[in-house]
Image: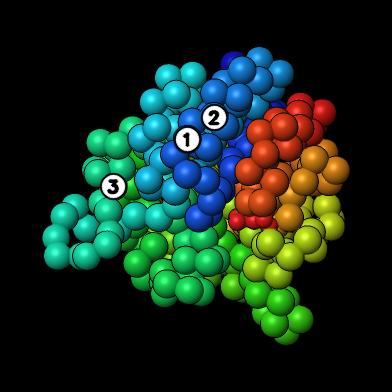
């Protein structure tokens, strides 16, 4: 019988592009066709796009059949109700989404997406059959105060409080230090790997062996020039990319960086 302690878990790298509030539908469709044409360059990497809601169905129609994830950038935890401006998980499924980004630092800071709400959103996404990417990350002040590990553990524990171990491997975590998002400042590979190893240790406390199957992405000013060195960390399983995901060539070049692992 094989010794399970000797098994090496291979996690397929995932590179997800968060378009934020950029691209009209025509631009989104053109991007999706161009990405479809380049997929064979990076067939050992999973790819996903998080388009604005207005383009989600268009992007999903082109890319989801090719195995590319199409994620909304947020969603409400309730199945339906009087929540003007919100959309539910089942509405996203209906529009063709395969997943949903949750807890992005811009949603947390600008729209009050709280750890309490995320504790409901992550299980609601899983129940609807969506792959959630839960974003966590410390602010610059928290890093300077030496409370990074505490803050990350708190966000992970809250966000995953309602997730059963049997479903844990369907959840992706994105470590996004707030000070590195959209600033051009990237965490060093050593800072990223240390944070990812800490997050995986917290996941092990919560889910035991399933933690080894969970993907932890790095996000924060990832570009073609720095992707490969960031992906070298053994606990860095891909990237959540903002600005550089708006150009299809850059997104493919970042994904190619994951092939060198
Ligand atoms: C993001 O929005 O999740 C992000 C990481 O942005 P950027 O790559 O532009 O820093």
Is residue 5 something one can see in this rendering? no
Q: Is residue 220 left or right of residue 163?
A: right
Cα distance, mark 2 to mark 3? 26 Å
Q: Quadrant of the N terminus?
A: top right
Q: Is residue 159 left or right of residue 135?
A: left
Q: Nearer the viewer, mark 1 or mark 3?
A: 1
Question: Label 3: how many residues lie within 10 Å, few (<14), some (14-19) or many (20+)?
Answer: many
Residue at (66%, 15%) from the top-left corner?
A: 40
Which x, y percent locates residue 39? 63, 20
Q: Is residue 88 left or right of residue 243?
A: left
Which x, y percent locates residue 256? 76, 29
Residue with the mark numbered 1: 26
Residue at (28%, 47%) from the top-left corner?
A: 89
Tell me: residue 194, above or below residue 254: below
Closest to the observer, 85 or 106: 85
Question: Label 1: how many residues lie within 10 Å, few (<14), some (14-19) or many (20+)?
Answer: few
Asked if the residue under mark 1 is in contact with the one under mark 2, i.e. CB atoms within 8 Å, the reply is: yes
Residue at (27%, 62%) from the top-left corner?
A: 85
Residue with the mark numbered 3: 89
């Amino acid at each position: 019988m094989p010794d399970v302690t000797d098994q090496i878990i291979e996690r397929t790298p995932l590179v997800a592009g968060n378009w934020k509030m950029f691209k009209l539908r025509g631009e989104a469709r053109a991007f999706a066709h161009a990405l479809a044409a380049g997929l064979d360059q990076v067939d050992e990497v999973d790819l996903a796009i998080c388009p604005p809601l207005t383009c989600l169905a268009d992007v999903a129609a082109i890319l989801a059949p090719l195995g590319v994830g199409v994620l909304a950038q947020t969603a409400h935890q309730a199945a339906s109700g009087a929540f003007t401006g919100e959309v539910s998980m089942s509405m996203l499924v209906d529009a063709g989404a395969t997943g949903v980004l949750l807890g992005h630092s811009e949603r947390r800071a600008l729209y009050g997406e709280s750890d309490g709400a995320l504790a409901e959103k992550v299980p609601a996404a899983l129940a609807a059959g969506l792959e959630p990417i839960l974003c966590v990350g410390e602010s610059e002040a928290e890093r300077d105060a030496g409370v990074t590990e505490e803050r990350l553990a708190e966000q992970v524990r809250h966000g995953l409080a309602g997730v059963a171990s049997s479903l844990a491997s369907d959840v992706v975590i994105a470590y996004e230090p707030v000070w590195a998002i959209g600033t051009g400042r990237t965490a060093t590979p050593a800072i990223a790997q240390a944070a990812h190893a800490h997050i995986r240790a917290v996941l092990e406390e919560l889910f035991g062996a399933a933690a080894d199957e969970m993907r932890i992405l790095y996000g924060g000013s990832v570009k073609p020039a720095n992707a490969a060195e960031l992906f070298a960390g053994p606990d860095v399983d891909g990237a959540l990319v903002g600005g550089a995901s708006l150009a299809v060539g850059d997104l493919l070049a970042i994904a190619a960086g994951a092939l060198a692992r």
